[in-house]
Amino acid sequence: MAATARNALLKYLRVQVEAVPRNPSTTSSSVFLNSFNALRRHFSTEEVRGSFLDKSEVTERVITVVKNFQKVDPSKVTPNANFQSDLGLDSLDSVEVVMALEEEFGFEIPDNEADKINSISLAVDFIASHPQAK
Amino acid sequence: MGGSSGPRLSGMQRQVLGLYRGFLRAARLKSIEDRQKIESIVSAEFRHNAKHVDRKNFLYIEYLLRRGKKQLDQLKSPDIDGLSSLDVGLSQTHHTKA
C-alpha cells in the first residue's frame, strides 16, 4: 500500500518537475526540514526527493498575491486571514485567488485540494508541503 | 454564493466552482488579450447567475452546468477564441428565470 503510493508519487513528481520551468528567481535549496515533516504528514513516506520552499518565503509571496487581488483591502491581509470571513471574498473569488497562487508558484492545484484552501495559512501549508512549488 | 458559510460545500457548489476553475484554466492558454476578455465574460456570467438564480432551483443549475461544460469543451479547442459562443450564453440567461 505504502509502496504503491510512493511509486505513484515519485512518478507524478518526475513528470511534473521538468514540465514547468517558471519562476526561476526563487531558490529551492533552503530549509528542507520544515517542509519535509509536512510532507511526511501528507504522504507518510520518507524518501521522497524534491525541493521545498521556505515557509516564511511562501507566506510572504502568498500575502503579496492576495494583497494584489483587486477586491481585497490590503490592510486586512494577515498570515491568519480567512478569505471569506476576514477578507470578504466569496467562493468564486477564492477560486480566483487560488488560481493566482498557482501561477505565482508554477504548479497546478487539483480541484479537491483547491476547494479546501480558504485561508492564507491553509494556502501556505499546502504550498510549502508541495515539492513542485517554485 | 456561499456567504459566510464555512468550507463545507455541496456537491453542486463544487461542480460550479470546478467549472469556473476549468474556464479560467482554459483562458490561460489563449492570447493575453483573449484571456482577459474571456475572464471578464466568464466571471460576469458566473456572478450574474450566482446572484439571480435561486439556489434551490437544482434543475436549472444542472442545465447551466451542462451548458457550461459544453461551452468549456469548445473553448478548449485551440482555434476558438471563445467570445461568440459565450455571448450566446450570456444573452440566454436574461430570458430564463427561476
Image: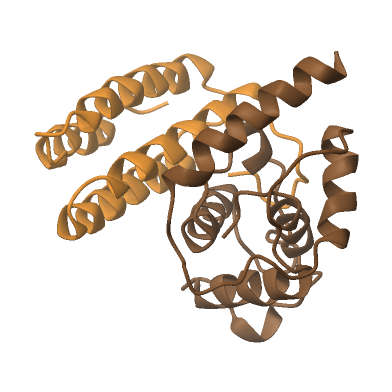
Chain colours: A brown, B orange
Question: In the picture, which quadrant includes the C terminus of chain B?
Answer: top left
Q: Position of residue B37 (x, y in %)?
A: 20, 55
* Residue in the picture at 72% in, 71% down: A59
- Residue B47's place in the image compared with A12, above or below, is below
Q: Do we see residue B1 in this rendering?
A: yes
Q: Residue at x 28, y 20 (%)?
A: B70
Residue B29 vertical position relative to residue A29 in the rendered view, above or below: above
Return the residue found at the far bottom: A75
Q: Residue at x 77, y 21 (%)?
A: A5
Q: Position of residue A27 (x, y in %)?
A: 61, 71
- Where is residue A18 drawn, in percent x and y? 47, 45
Residue B31 position (above or below residue A113): below
Q: Judge by depth and name the residue closer to the eye, B14 or A104.
A: A104
Quarter of image, res A101? bottom right
**Near-viewer residue (A131 or B25):** A131
The N terminus of chain B sits in image quarter: top right
The picture quadrant where one finds residue A133 is bottom right
Depth order, front residue of A89/A74:
A74
Measuring 51% from the left and 71% from the top, which residue is drawn there? A71
Lateral position of residue B87 relative to residue B9, left or right: left
Q: Is residue B79 above or below residue A100?
A: above
- Total label count? 0
Task: Note whether residue B17 is visible.
Answer: no
Instruction: Pinpoint residue A92: horizontal percent, then vertical percent.
Output: 52, 49
Left or right: B85, with A128 as reference point = left
Q: In the figure, is residue B68 to the left or right of A68?
A: left
Q: Quadrant of residue A53?
A: bottom right
